[in-house]
Image: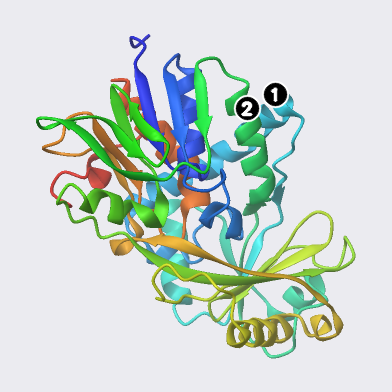
Amino acid sequence: MAKQQQVVVVGGGVIGLLTAFNLASAGQRVVLLDRSNLGQESSWAGGGIVSPLYPWRYSPAVTALAHWSQDFYPQLAERLFASTGVDPQVHTTGLYWLDLDDESAALEWARRENRPLSVVDIDATHSAVPVLGPGFSRAIYMANVANVRNPRLLKSLRAALLALPDVTVHEQCAVSGFIRDGQRIVGVHTANGDVHGDQVVLAAGAWSGELLGSLGLTLPVEPVKGQMILYKCAEDFLSCMVLAKGRYAIPRRDGHILIGSTLEHEGFDKTPTESALESLKASAVELIPALAGAEVVGHWAGLRPGSPEGIPYIGPVPGFSGLWLNCGHYRNGLVLAPASCQLFTDLMLGREPIIDPAPYAPSGRL
């Protein structure tokens, strides 16, 4: 086992929480800091589909993390539920993609990656999803795609983390910069005083680029706003996830239906807008006409940590020993979290990594 060190984790979203959980489970002392409350930003706001929206449009680097995570999610959820009593609700529904422009690329990807994606006759699709709107002509389907109820996942992760020894959590504790000893990073400055550590992990989502900028490094991670709406329907109203024209409907087990999402470059403003509400409602009714009469029970926005090609930064920062990154997951933080945080833990503790870490290394990418 690696010798015990104090690791300071900056950011308490799904990436920070799971990083802290993995390190604490391996016997490290962990201090987790968040500028607001744990898990209240992008991780809470997302839809929780356990797949990239269009997995064939991503690089092999994203695919490798996604496949590992998809296979691992059910056991992670079981472990968390067993230890906390809070069920993250990993709900395997399958996913229909409708009227894709790049259907042939999707099918070719599925053959290459050995994924169960197939063309489905549109009449059969309507039989399987009776509430689907009439305006679609083609469908492809992947049976084993799940969604996780991300607010429950975050609640469960938080409880599991706080039950471990040698864990300290500070909420409402904004980090303003790093404590340096020459070229070594030995802690962080916060609004509530300095916090020292043997290692510091930056897992601050959309805020990671700003923080790393205080060291004169340019990390191309920037906030990308996404808005969602929520309906409440009967439990058996929608049996599976559907996706068309970049918009999706996700059923939860209790009949809540999530519709998402927008992609907006508005800096750190996450005010929900009337224009997005109307646009999302229009997409909802196009996908599922019966939603025209349903009440919107929620509308919110979050800030994704946008990064080039959506490839996260996982590993040590060159030139600053003691500083590590696990950030920049863009649209796939919930999808990629289990693999990203396992890979990160392997690297920090000197274990054999689960996948080749080279594509995610900050070295050469900052």
Q: Residue furthest front?
A: 192
From the image, which quarter does the N terminus lie in?
A: top left
Alpha carbon separation for disc pair 1 and 2: 7 Å
Q: Is residue 136 left or right of residue 33?
A: right
Q: Residue at x 15, y 43 (%)?
A: 363
Crowd tier of the residue under label 2, counting other residues whose Cα lies within 10 Å: few below 14, some 14–19, many 20 or above: many
Q: Residue 348 placed where, x, y %?
A: 31, 26
Instruction: Inspect this view and state whether residue 121 appears.
Output: yes
**Which residue is the site of mark 1?**
83
Tag count:
2
Q: Residue 205 placed where, x, y %?
A: 41, 52
Q: State whether residue 242 is above or below residue 356.
A: below
Q: State whether residue 268 is above or below residue 161.
A: below
Q: Are marks 1 and 2 in contact (CB under 8 Å)?
A: yes
Residue 3's disc number: none
Q: Is residue 119 left or right of residue 336?
A: right
**Pair 1/2: label in front:** 2
SS label for mark 2 = helix
Q: Residue at x 78, y 72 (%)?
A: 129
Instruction: Please state which of residues 348 and 28 is positioned toward the viewer in this rendering.
Output: 28
Q: State whether residue 143 is above or below residue 129.
A: above
The amino acid at mark 2 is Ala
**Which residue is the site of mark 2?**
160
Q: Indicate the quadrant where residue 342 lies.
A: top left
SS label for mark 1 = helix
Q: Indicate the quadrant where residue 193 lies.
A: top left
Q: Residue at x 56, y 55 (%)?
A: 116
The amino acid at mark 1 is Ser
Instruction: Inspect this view and state whether residue 357 appears.
Output: no
Q: Indicate the quadrant where residue 268 lies.
A: bottom left
Q: Residue at x 67, y 36 (%)?
A: 156
